[in-house]
Image (cartoon, rainbow, N blue to C red):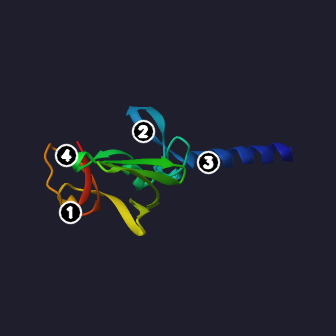
Amino acid sequence: MRRSLMLASLVVAAVAVIGGCTQTAETKPGTTIPVANPSASPPQSPVTDDKKPVSKADALQGEWPGQGGAILKVEKKGDKYEIEIRTKDGSKKFEGTARGDAIEFVRNGKTETIKAASLEETGIKWIGGEKTCVVINKGTEAYCRK
């Protein structure tokens, strides 16, 4: 008998806990549908398919056309970024690291930063309706795509 009372009280307690995590929404008079309580589950960071947090620097990936036929290519390789800068003089590759919403890399002994920029922030006059840009050196090195 004691076990029956203990089991019954556990069931009642479980139902009370579960009931505290849901709310009801009325659809028709007398009809309710359980609705999850948003405060019952904490907000989560954006995640990719492999459940790792998404970095703002990830948005800088892809090919970015520059002036004079130059191309900036940014590709994520594990926790690092492979950066390739192609110009009329050739192609050079660098390894970059995410730093907040930018990617840092070392070129010719100097730390450079690739970051998102508006057309005006590039410091370069563009033609062709570019809308999305990245800048490495304002006024001299920027890449934009439509």
**Which element is circle 1 on?**
loop
Distance between the Cα atoms at labels 3 and 1? Answer: 64 Å
Determine the image quadrant of residue 55.
Answer: bottom left
Q: Residues within 10 Å of mark 3 (few under 14, many from 20)?
A: few
- Image quarter of the C terminus: top left
Distance between the Cα atoms at labels 2 and 3? Answer: 18 Å
Distance between the Cα atoms at labels 2 and 4? Answer: 47 Å
Residue hosting label 2: 25
Q: Is residue 120 above or below residue 75?
A: below
Residue hosting label 4: 130
Residue 109 visible in the current orientation? yes
Residue visible at 22% across and 48% down in the picture: 68
Residue hosting label 3: 16
Q: Is residue 80 above or below residue 63?
A: below
Residue visible at 82% across and 42% down in the picture: 4
Picture coordinates of residue 47, whole percent (x, y): 49, 47
**Residue type indicated by callout 2:** Ala
**Residue type indicated by callout 1:** Gly
Name the foreground residue: 49 vs 145: 145
Eye-nearest disc, 2 or 4? 4
Q: Earlier in the sequence, mark 1 or mark 2?
A: 2
**Which element is circle 3 on?**
helix
Residue 45 visible in the current orientation? no
Eye-nearest disc, 3 or 1? 1
Name the foreground residue: 110 vs 133: 110
**Residue type indicated by callout 4:** Glu
Residue hosting label 1: 139
